[in-house]
Image (tube, rainbow, N blue to C red):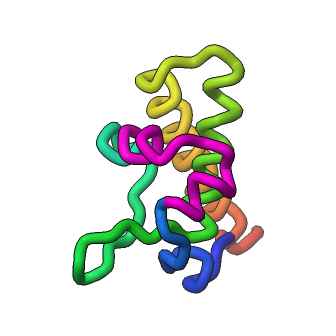
Amino acid sequence: MEGPDERRGVFAISVAAEMVSMQIQNLRVYERRGLVSPDRTQGGSRLYSPVDIDRLHRVRELLADGLNLAGIARVLVLEDRVRELEDRDRDQPRA
């Protein structure tokens, strides 16, 4: 489970791209496709959080496995849903 600091955007797009070994343009495409949602400064610059960086690493893994961006989007949605259900199950009192 992520804390609030892990969701706060702190890395500029150039730093984020370097961290995940991707081109800046790819990060912009992934944002347009809804695979990642970086924060924005008042001036409109993207700021990527540690959670965004983890997600970009996952995108890279799925690309290497041969998935296209539509498939990756679906996998990420399903993985997010599984995580939500696991969190909810963990928070339920046991009988």
Answer whether residue 28 is magenta in the image. yes
In this rendering, the answer to whether 15 lies above or below 66 is below
Residue 54: x %, y % from top left: 66, 55
Left or right: where does residue 31 sit relative to residue 95? left
In this rendering, the answer to whether 13 lies above or below 78 is below
Query: Is 70 or 88 nearer to us in this picture?
Result: 70
The answer to whether residue 85 of the structure is visible from this angle is no
Q: Identify which residue is drawn at 49% across, 69% down.
A: 12
User: What range is drawn magenta here?
Assistant: 14-29
The answer to whether residue 84 of the structure is visible from this angle is yes
Residue 22: x %, y % from top left: 59, 42
Extreme residue toward the top, this view: 66
Count of numbered circles in the view: 0
Q: Identify which residue is drawn at 65% across, 28% down.
A: 62
Q: Identify which residue is drawn at 53% across, 78% down.
A: 10
Left or right: where does residue 7 sit relative to residue 66? left
Please, what is the dominant secondary structure of the magenta stretch? helix
Extreme residue toward the left, this view: 43
Answer whether residue 88 is magenta in the image. no
Q: Look at the image and tell me in which quarter the N terminus lies.
A: bottom right
Residue 19: x %, y % from top left: 68, 57
Q: Quadrant of residue 6?
A: bottom right
